[in-house]
Amino acid sequence: MKRNQFIQTVAGAGFMAILPINLKALLSSQKGGLKFGVCADIHKDIMHDSDFRLKTFIEKASARDLDFIIQLGDFCRPYKYNREFLSIWDKYVGDKYHVIGNHEMDGGFSRKDVIDFWDIPKQYYSVDTNGFHIIVLDGNDKNHSKDKASGYARFIGKTQINWLKADLNSTKLPCIIFSHQTLENNDDGIENRVEIREMFEAENRRVGFNKILACFSGHHHTDYVAEINDIYYIQINSMSYEWLGEKCKTIRYSAEIDEKYPYIKYTIPYKEPLFAFVEISNKSIEIEGVKSSFVGPSPKELGCPVRPENKRIVPEITDRDLTLK
């Protein structure tokens, strides 16, 4: 989708009064609900067979009647040689959207480099489709406070927050939020996630119904759903792998692949690519996922520490039927 096809909402948009309305009645008026395909964390620059994985998703998505597809970040860095990979994505005929991940800027790239390479309007934006308001956030803003988290930036700055408030205020449509880092996870999620969640909850109270339905994210390479104050926070597992690090490294492919893609030994890849198809009706959010298996020894066989539920290493995206209230 080209830049001029997006609906872009500027900060400072005027107030739009929204009368209380029954969510199910509103969603019943949407023709056929909302249907989309979603994938996350392909990691073209780490995974040796990422082209095959993306082709599989695009082929499956192209065989369905969808409103759009979306990737949730850590897709590919803006190297010239990655244009062939990007062309696989562009073969999808319908609308398609990008979310910027933290690893897109590895190698000294800026977010502008990524925006130009992917041909998206800006790092955060919104668009209306089939009676729904789609909001894409950028969780890679810098936190300038002295007590900021270490490592990669995972913050939504003041300028983006002001834009988000105005954008939510400008639409009467039910909203779906997409970001790379989750707005739920207390460890590695967006640092000011509570502030953002409170904004969503305040908007729901203001309009008198659950206008913000769900927030989808990648980044965490796991399969997990949380419900916080009637909003679903849905983590989409990586298409490719989970990172295990130095303690659990093991060579899982040929010596040639290991030499060319040296970081794979620190991961536990999934044999088949993971992705999901989502349908939102007046009753529920239905997620149709993919089940795979590990390449080589499992985390348990390697003696890796057991993780909590929201960080489990699982080679799947679970089928779910989440009830809307």
Image (cartoon, grey):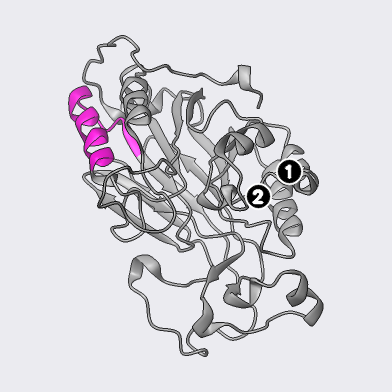
Quick check: 12 left or right of 107? left
First in residue order: circle 1 vs circle 2: 2
Of residues 247 and 207, which is closer to you in this image? 247
- The extreme top residue here reads 14
**CB of mark 1 within 8 Å of CB of mark 2?**
yes
Of residues 277 and 215, which is closer to you in this image? 215
Majority secondary structure of magenta residues: helix
Residue 49 in the image: above or below residue 139: below
Residue 19 in the image: above or below residue 221: above
In the rendered image, residue 11, in percent from the top left (x then y), is placed at 37, 18
Quick check: 206 left or right of 317? left
The residue that label 1 is drawn on is 86
In the rendered image, residue 84, in percent from the top left (x then y), is placed at 80, 46
**Magenta-tinted stretch:** 195-213
In the rendered image, residue 120, in percent from the top left (x then y), is placed at 61, 30
- Few, some or many residues within 10 Å of mark 1 (<14, 14–19, 20+): some
Residue 257 in the image: above or below residue 195: below
